[in-house]
Amino acid sequence: MAADSVNEQRLFPAARLREFTAAVFRHLGVPDADAGLAADVLAAADLRGIDSHGVARLHTYFDLLVAGRINPRPEVRVTRETASTATVDGDNGLGLVVGPKANEIAMDKADGAGTGWVAVSNTNHYGIAGYYPLRALERGLIGWAMTNSSPGVAPLWGAQRMLGTNPIAIAFPGKEEPPIVLDMATSAVAYGKIEIAHRAGKPIPKGWAVDREGGPTTDPRAMMDGGALLPLGSDREMGGHKGYGLGLMVDVLCAVLSGANWGPFAPPFAISQVLPSRSVGKGIGHFFGAMRIDAFRDPEEFKAQIDALVRTLRGTRPAPGTNGPLIPGDPEREAAAERTRLGIPLLPAVVADLLDISRRTGIAL
Amino acid sequence: MAADSVNEQRLFPAARLREFTAAVFRHLGVPDADAGLAADVLAAADLRGIDSHGVARLHTYFDLLVAGRINPRPEVRVTRETASTATVDGDNGLGLVVGPKANEIAMDKADGAGTGWVAVSNTNHYGIAGYYPLRALERGLIGWAMTNSSPGVAPLWGAQRMLGTNPIAIAFPGKEEPPIVLDMATSAVAYGKIEIAHRAGKPIPKGWAVDREGGPTTDPRAMMDGGALLPLGSDREMGGHKGYGLGLMVDVLCAVLSGANWGPFAPPFAISQVLPSRSVGKGIGHFFGAMRIDAFRDPEEFKAQIDALVRTLRGTRPAPGTNGPLIPGDPEREAAAERTRLGIPLLPAVVADLLDISRRTGIAL
């Protein structure tokens, strides 16, 4: 569709979008500091080129806050703790606020006990998983983040959406080399790729999705219309049981451990979607980890070895038709450099969403 | 090849193989308790149907001990620690001994600090990763285990073996339902599957491996002859960057964090293979984690919710031509039940290996 073409994207300075986002959250009753935090998380997604998780989602947060489905002033509470752990109740606040606060608790625990691990319930969509380990890097820590999400993925050999795309993120600092930053969904692809193929009227590769009967499909419509995404690995022969197992691991750590809704009962992040048939916990769940490097090894030695590993991997003989392996985090860092310079490209539909919010709040875009 | 057909397998009682294994290790100078531990780890693989990691590998451990390449009497030492962490030097002992001891340290740390995390260097092949979280389950803990291994996998877009099959294992206990036990390599398939196809004279599916030029191949010989396995997800379109990222994560946690050899420098687990061009640490590395459930949530509530999640997943509408989703650990548990009853089936080549050890040690099989 022409409206989605790159040519029609408009560029916005990252700072301007960030200010708009913070003002919108403040307008909806979110305290100043929390609104700034939430805007930071969305801005990180736009800057790093993960367009699906940035201001493109602001209207959904807006809708849920206006409808009273998210608490603008949550009291984020630790309900259980040990030297290295905490369980956090997010009080149904924005995931964009609950997430950073819970991540902070994990990092504080690590300062004291060597590592910190925090399971969070009663929260919702927390933006890009990669945001959280990046904060840990700023404090010289190794950071982990996972979250469950509303069901979109079929377990291997299943014909129903039972798990979210349940991402895993982790980051390791280098000395002179940029950090290794892994941020990956445990599904074969993101739902956004199905939508893009659908809008373009193109088939999707076999292995991305099943139709409503659970059979393989190359029709994006068949996935969207009651079908499901496939886990990383896709089918049995290629390791689909592994992607399914990883998605399940994330679900347990985020939701079962914290007391959130797991599996098919994770509530949707959209005002229009039907709520699950029953509730088995509170909201969705996150899981954060932080590890002090000096709890294991001299940090300077560690970082020097990361540099050596990164350089060794970059020195791999390239496969035909490629420039050789990347390091996890390379594409996002390149996007951030370009977008800092040029601005954030937004599709017309996203701009229209932001203008709608602007009109309804009186906040100038 | 007929010699590998199931019909020619011989059945051995698990206890007999376990006793033989322990006696062989004792014969090679491994102290009684350690020999029993090592035999336990190998026996767990055979019982759970992971034939590549059980007594089929005994001859390799035998060769390495006889050649003085493994220390039969290691002094496993904690070189650095905090409340929730330890770094362990395995003193070049058997991974089958160093692994269980380091795992124990992680569990002891968890008892004190809520969680325990142990990075291990100067060790070697530790058997099946799944063994370690199963021990944690016996102590009512959630257990994690990872290990790096000698290079066999190409990073996405690479034409060289740079990472091991670097497995991840984790287990969660149920109340009435059996536990969820994930134990997966981060490659698309195990090397063993390439060997099986080669012996059978059959092609391998596209997506498992590349040839020595880094191009896709369906010829098992082309992988074995200087090619490489592909990471889980196989190619860019199907998420090969994710499997590569996970394998890299395991390498960092196991080897960079502990001071072991990472990436292509991980030493081979075989007497005949060429040693890496240089050493960047000590031996290979493992990473263990243990989490007290009550550090996060009431354990009875947690287990009841795991039961509910497991039953929900089992209730998924099946995909056509399948019986519906399994739970990670199902196949291994079924194998263990059958093999406890009937014995461990060994291929003629494995029996010949054991008979060779028997002849050289005077220990009756």
Image (cartoon, coloured by chain):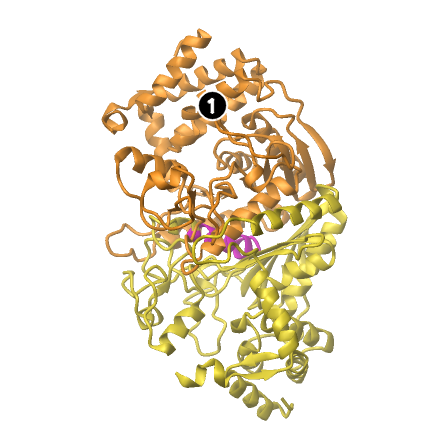
Chain colours: A orange, B yellow
Amino acid type of the residue that numbered disc 1 sits on in the rendered structure: Thr
Q: Is residue B249 above or below residue B147?
A: above
Tell whether position B252 is magenta: yes
Q: Please, is residue A136 above or below residue B217 in the view?
A: above
Q: Which residue is mark 1?
A: A60
Residue A136 place in picture, x, y as percent: 55, 37
Residue A172, image x, y percentages = 50, 44
**Label 1 crowding class (10 Å Cα cut-off): few <14, some 14-19, many 20+?**
some
Q: Quadrant of residue A317?
A: bottom left
Q: Is residue B114 visible?
A: no
The foreground one among B68 and A333 is A333
Name the residue rendered at 58%, 68% in the picture. B127
Question: Picture coordinates of residue A35 (x, y %)?
Answer: 54, 18
Residue at screen point 55% across, 68% down: B125
Residue A221 in which image quadrant: top left
Give the image location of residue A5, x and y in percent.
Answer: 25, 28
- The residue at the point 70 percent across, 60 percent down is B104
User: What is the span of residues highlighted in magenta in the rendered image?
Assistant: B243-259
The C terminus of chain A: image quadrant: top left
- Residue beneath the point at 52% across and 54% down: B325
Q: Secondary structure at mark 1?
A: helix
- Give the number of marks: 1
Q: Camera-side residue: A6 or B84? A: A6
Provide the chain ID for the residue under circle 1: A
Q: Is residue B22 magenta?
A: no
Q: Main secondary structure of the magenta part?
A: helix
Q: Is residue A6 left or right of residue A234?
A: left
Quadrant of the image occupied by residue A30 = top right
Which of these two is toward me, B339 or B282?
Answer: B339
Q: Is residue A117 left or right of residue A152?
A: right
- Work out which quarter of the rendered image holds the N terminus of chain A and state it: top left
Task: Say above or below: B159 vs A364.
Answer: below
